Image (cartoon, helix red, strand yellow):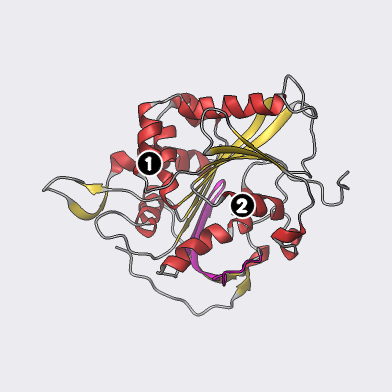
Amino acid sequence: MLTVVFWCIVTQNARSEPGQDQDATTQTASAQPAPDRTLSLPSDTRHTLWIPSDYQHQGKTIDVLVDFHSSPSLVRASTRLAKLNCVVISVKYAGLSSVYRVPFSKNRQLFAAILDEALNALRAETDFPKDAQWGQLAITSFSAGFGAVREILKTQDDFERINGIFMVDSLYCGYVGDSTDAIEKGVVSPPLMKDFLRFAKLAADGEKVMIITHSMVPTPGYASTCETADYLMDQLDLEPEPVAIVVEPAIKSEIQAVKIRLYRKAIRKGFSLYGSSGGGGADHVAHMRNMDYWLPALPIAKREAHTKVP
């Protein structure tokens, strides 16, 4: 396990750190224009397609963000704040990681089927081309959603078509010998991390984009997001840089928002990792509430800042 060491350095304003265009963070979720469209996909009402009212058409190519387990409303608000010019597919199940792992492991074509169904739904909308095609594809995963991502990456076609991944305090893993009497506590299982590491290596080479955030929330019995972050950095031979960055919540909420206090980061080309010091449940949720801080780094088209909404 990592021993956390805090360094005395000047605190930065986090809203100017990783994003390419962060002036949208002065907005709030309530500032969004209307109407947006939210469509439930026919095969499973837990799969929804969101089309923002300020989506800017770029011919027949449409960028798409697929999210697993985050609050759909927060993902949508964060996407708008980050000025991503894309549609959003939300996959939201009730339960722990197994509710995501099982369906995507039993049906290796499920991810492709969700994308196809969403694309057909877009083609049926009067303002989208009948021959619309997916452009850039990125995945976000919060908490238990990693169970789906791990299974999706096992299918080579899916692995290749994904341009970017953002694991929002979401990359957990079993230990070596998990579910046996020979479990080696504290030793991250390489087979379970294999495809995440493969994607991370491509990102570190500049071929894909991978963003990892972690908290210090302990997870007795299996590897925490901090432990898997250490594993990836060790495998990539990447040393973290000490930072003192406070991420201020940009989305207004009735619930008291928690700041994220980052203490380390590690970046190599398309791979970036950020660690926070919070160790409670609210600190975990804060990563989802502040997704807009990191979303601009995904390889998704951005909206033009001053384009008027009809």
Q: Is mark 1 on a helix, strand or loop?
A: helix
| Percent coordinates x, y for residue 165 in the rendering | 53, 43
Seen from the viewer's position, the closer of residues 176 and 41 is: 41
In this picture, residue 84 sits left or right of residue 67: right
* Residue of label 1: 99
Based on the picture, tell me whether residue 268 belongs to the magenta stretch. yes
State yes or no: residue 204 in magenta.
Answer: no
Q: Residues within 10 Å of mark 2 (few under 14, many from 20)?
A: few
Earlier residue among tags 1 and 2? 2
Tag count in the figure?
2
Residues in magenta, as a range = 252-276
113 w.r.t. 143: above or below: above
Residue in the foreground of this view, choosing between 230 and 212: 212
Q: Identify the residue shown where x is 68% and y is 64%.
A: 16
Q: What residue type is labelled 1?
A: Val
Position of 35 compared to 77: left or right? right
Residue 275 - label: none
Residue identifier under label 2: 73
Mark 2: which amino acid? Answer: Ser
Q: In which quarter of the image is the C terminus?
A: top right
The residue under the point 58% across, 39% down is 138
Q: Is residue 101 left or right of residue 185?
A: right
| Residue 171, horizontal then vertical, whole percent | 41, 50
Residue at the bottom extreme, as displayed? 8
Q: In this view, does 50 lie above or below 293?
A: above
Can residue 251 be seen here? The reply is yes
| Camera-side residue of 270 and 247 | 247
Q: Where is residue 167 in the image (x, y as percent from the top left)?
A: 49, 49
Residue positioned most to the left: 181
Instruction: Report the residue that reaches farthest toward the top.
Output: 131
